[in-house]
Image (spheres, rainbow, N blue to C red):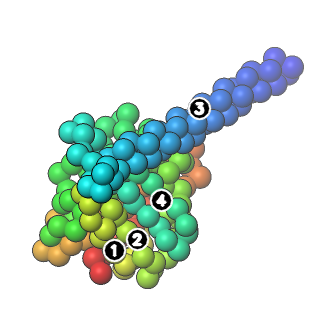
């Protein structure tokens, strides 16, 4: 019985360590992204600083929740650890079609459980700010791809795994959709 207790405590501490390290990596990823963003958007001698070719970030803001995130281009495993990502084959912010941004539920996009229909979401990208209004919230099976389809109007889709406090690979997706204002 004592051995079982030691094993369970060890497993619990190991799981907690993994969770804390992922949270730290995600937080540090956003700190580094903010530095890159500041460099990318700096004004030098009254003119916008030339963008570095290797930097491709946008800033995603939830004004009513007073939160912002820096979004990387491309949904790689590494990028998802560091913060939200713009799904490469989706539309760019403000363009016709569906701009899809994804992030992990246990780090950056846990905030989606606080988003409400009617909330404003903004994206600053390529020197412009695009404002969207939330029109729907949905919970769907992981294989349901209808929210990822491209359309004829500018649309923003935020996606994360669901349930938010699920241990292991989550079976569903939480979807926030917003239309360009």
* Residue sitting at the far top: 3
What whole-number distance in Å separates the C-alpha atoms at marks 3 and 2?
A: 29 Å
Q: Residue at x 44, y 64 (%)?
A: 61
Q: Name the residue under label 1.
A: 131
Q: Do the residues labelled 1 and 2 touch (CB within 8 Å)?
A: yes
Query: Along the line of sight, which residue is nearer the eye, 83 or 161?
Result: 83
Residue 24: quarter of image:
top right
Which residue is more in the foreground, 9 or 107? 107
Q: Residues within 10 Å of mark 1 (few under 14, many from 20)?
A: some
Whichever of labels 3 and 4 marks the residue nearer the N terminus, that label is 3
> Which is nearer the N-term, disc 4 or disc 1?
4
Which numbered tag is attached to residue 21? Answer: 3
Mark sitting earlier along the chain (3/2): 3
Nearer to the camera, 149 or 6: 149
Name the residue carrying label 2.
Answer: 121
Do the CB atoms of the residues marked 3 and 4 lie less than 8 Å apart?
A: no
Q: Position of residue 155 (x, y in %)?
A: 25, 71
Q: Can residue 155 be seen in this view?
A: yes
Compared with 70, 16 (above or below) is above
Residue 63 placement (x, y as % from top left): 49, 71
The residue beneath circle 4 is: 68
Q: Farthest residue in the front direction?
A: 45
- First in sequence: mark 2 or mark 4? 4
Q: Residues within 10 Å of mark 3 (few under 14, many from 20)?
A: few
């Amino acid at each position: 019985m004592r051995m079982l207790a030691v094993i369970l405590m060890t497993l619990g501490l190991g799981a907690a360590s993994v969770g804390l390290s992922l949270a730290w990596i995600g937080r540090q990823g956003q700190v580094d992204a903010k530095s890159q963003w500041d460099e990318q958007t700096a004004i030098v001698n009254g003119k916008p600083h030339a963008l570095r070719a290797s930097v491709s970030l946008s800033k995603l803001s939830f004004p009513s929740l007073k939160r912002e995130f820096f979004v990387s281009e491309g949904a790689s495993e590494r990028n998802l650890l560091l913060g939200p990502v713009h799904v490469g084959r989706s539309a760019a912010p403000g363009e016709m079609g569906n701009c899809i941004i994804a992030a992990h539920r246990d780090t950056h996009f846990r905030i989606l459980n606080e988003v409400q229909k009617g909330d404003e979401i903004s994206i600053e990208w390529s020197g412009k700010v695009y404002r969207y209004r939330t029109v729907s919230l949905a919970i769907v099976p992981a294989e349901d791809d209808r929210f990822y389809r491209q359309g004829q109007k500018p649309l923003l889709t935020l996606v994360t795994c669901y349930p938010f406090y699920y241990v292991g690979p989550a079976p569903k997706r939480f979807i926030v959709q917003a239309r360009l204002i």
